[in-house]
Amino acid sequence: TDATSDLFTLPKAELHLHIEGTLEPELAFELADRNRIRLPYESVDQLASRYSFTDLQSFLDLYYATMTVLRTEDDFAELTRRYLRRATAQGVRHAEIFFDPQAHVSRGVPFEAVVDGIGAALAEAARDQDVSGGLILCFLRDRPVVEAEQILTTALARVDTLIGVGLDSAEVGYPPSLFADVFGRARAAGLHAVAHAGEEGPASYIGEALDLLEAERIDHGIRAVEDPALVGRLAHEETALTVCPLSNVRLRAVPDLTAHPLRSLMDAGVRVTVNSDDPAYFGGYIGDNFVAVQDALELTDLDMMRIAQNSVESAFAPLDRKVALL
Ligand code: ADE
Ligand code: ZN
């Protein structure tokens, strides 16, 4: 429809996107063949049929198992090329891409292969498709803190390849406070800070991410609605939430889209953005999330423009780039 194509062409920044979560079943099989790895599925369709989840952990189990087909610099470049093709077709003009280096380095893939592969595809797309972007290294919060310290040390040797650090993986039981020192080091090196908080975990983790990690944006953050004082703080401090509506439905963080708190957060004055999280697994890229959420929450076209504008304003991009996209 026209409404769909308008939402797809609206210039937007994608601020919550795990590059490993863009691995479509077709590419997973191509890379498995190329790298002589056996996936425990008979076919693309059989793998795709497993993309049905009961909670965050049930997704993470498949996510970490499937990403083992990513081995070489060119694998990461091809993954990123395909993501950027789909994303630009849905209006993404700036992409801040999360990656999980601990999940690759622990399998013997060099950190450099990961950042150089993703970086090469980003550079190509900047040249050919007018999309800008950068890389945000996510620490796996359900792994030992010492492992995060070690990957940060590795990463700081190539700090030029990064714009920031984040925190992801299984949330409940792994509060942001564990990572205060790691984030302090990263910030001291000039990196931006973001963190997943309040996806499955309690609203108190959002406060911790702000106070102890000095997170500049909160990834998900939807459980903030349970704490009105926190909602007031987020609005007052103009902290962006990188909300991922289709992800929240697929991982059962919300019962269905009509019950999604995005609208109440927006109405309370919180700077909400809409993003795709792990689009290959959750049934849609960023434009699909815009369409679904407008429909389910009866948001106006002006609301959708505001959401897109929020994403550009909240990006870690140079001011002249933001101005060009607004
Ligand atoms: N890693 C990839 N997607 C994630 C999500 N939605 N929450 C936490 N960790 C993730
Ligand atoms: Zn995420």
Image (cartoon, grey):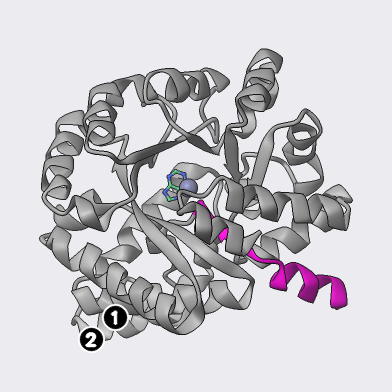
At mark 2, the secondary structure is: helix
Query: Percent x, y for residue 241?
Result: 59, 38
The correct choice, above or below, for 284 with respect to 181 in the image is below
Quarter of the figure that contains the C terminus: bottom right
Can residue 43 be seen in this snapshot?
no
| Neighbours of disc 2 within 10 Å: few (<14), some (14-19), many (20+) | few
Question: Does residue 14 appear left or right of residue 173 in this picture?
Answer: right
Q: 123 or 62: which is nearer to us?
A: 123
* x, y percent for residue 87: 55, 71
> Residue 277 colored magenta?
no
Q: Are marks 1 and 2 in contact (CB under 8 Å)?
A: yes
Specify whether residue 322 is in view.
yes
Marker disc for residue 123: none
Q: Is residue 180 above or below residue 49?
A: above
Q: Residue at x 43, y 33 (%)?
A: 171
| Rendered image: mark on residue 31 | 1
Disc marking residue 34: 2
Residue 173 picture quarter:
top left
Q: Quadrant of residue 92?
A: bottom right
- Does 203 sit above or below residue 33? above
Pick the front one: 29 or 164: 164
> Residue 37 at what x, y percent from top left?
21, 76
Q: Residue at x 62, y 39 (%)?
A: 253
| Residue lying at 84% horizontally and 48% vertically, measured from the top left | 297
Which contiguous range is marked in magenta? 2-16
Q: Is residue 3 magenta?
A: yes
Viewer-proximal residue among 52 and 30: 30
Q: Amino acid at mark 1?
A: Leu
